[in-house]
Image: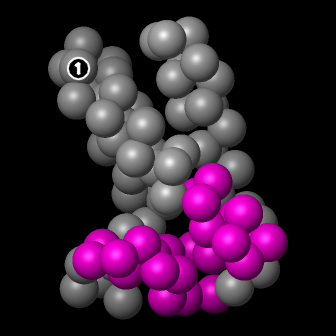
């Protein structure tokens, strides 16, 4: 599903690249990705591989507890930002 789904691996790669080049947008990507996963985890009790861009609803592979853990690095950085 490469037609617009929000994939955590893709978000992480963009986040990391922007951060490495000192482009402040990485903070926005981290914040939105953390919020997306956190809200879905609270709502459904699980994480998915990807989410719909329009409403943040999960769309692929429930019980996906693997690449989504990359958000933990984002969370650590985000906590240091505030």
Dot 1 surroundings within 10 Å: few (below 14), some, or many (20 or more)?
A: few
Q: How many marks?
A: 1
The x, y position of residue 80, in whole percent, is: 56, 10
The answer to whether residue 12 is seen in the rendering is yes
- The residue at the point 70 percent across, 64 percent down is 41
Instruction: Say which residue label 1 marks.
Output: 24
48 w.r.t. 19: above or below = below
Is residue 54 part of the magenta span, yes or no? yes
- The residue at the point 35 percent across, 27 percent down is 27
- The residue at the point 35 percent across, 76 percent down is 55
In the depicted view, which residue is nearer to us: 4 or 13?
A: 4
From the viewer's perspective, is 80 left or right of 53?
right
Q: Quadrant of residue 15?
A: top left
From the viewer's perspective, is 54 left or right of 11?
left
18 w.r.t. 40: above or below = above
Is residue 46 part of the magenta span, yes or no? yes
The answer to whether residue 64 is seen in the rendering is no
Quarter the N terminus occupies: bottom left
The x, y position of residue 47, in whole percent, is: 69, 70
32 w.r.t. 40: above or below = above
Chain part drawn in magenta: 37-61
- The residue at the point 54 percent across, 33 percent down is 74
78 w.r.t. 17: above or below = above
From the viewer's perspective, is 5 left or right of 80?
left
């Amino acid at each position: 599903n490469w037609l617009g789904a929000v994939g955590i691996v893709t978000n992480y790669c963009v986040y990391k690249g922007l951060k490495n080049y000192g482009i402040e947008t990485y903070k926005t990507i981290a914040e939105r990705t953390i919020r997306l996963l956190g809200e879905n985890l609270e709502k459904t009790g699980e994480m998915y591989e990807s989410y719909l861009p329009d409403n943040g609803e999960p769309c692929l592979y429930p019980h996906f507890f693997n690449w989504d853990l990359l958000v933990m690095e984002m969370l650590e950085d985000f906590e240091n930002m505030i």
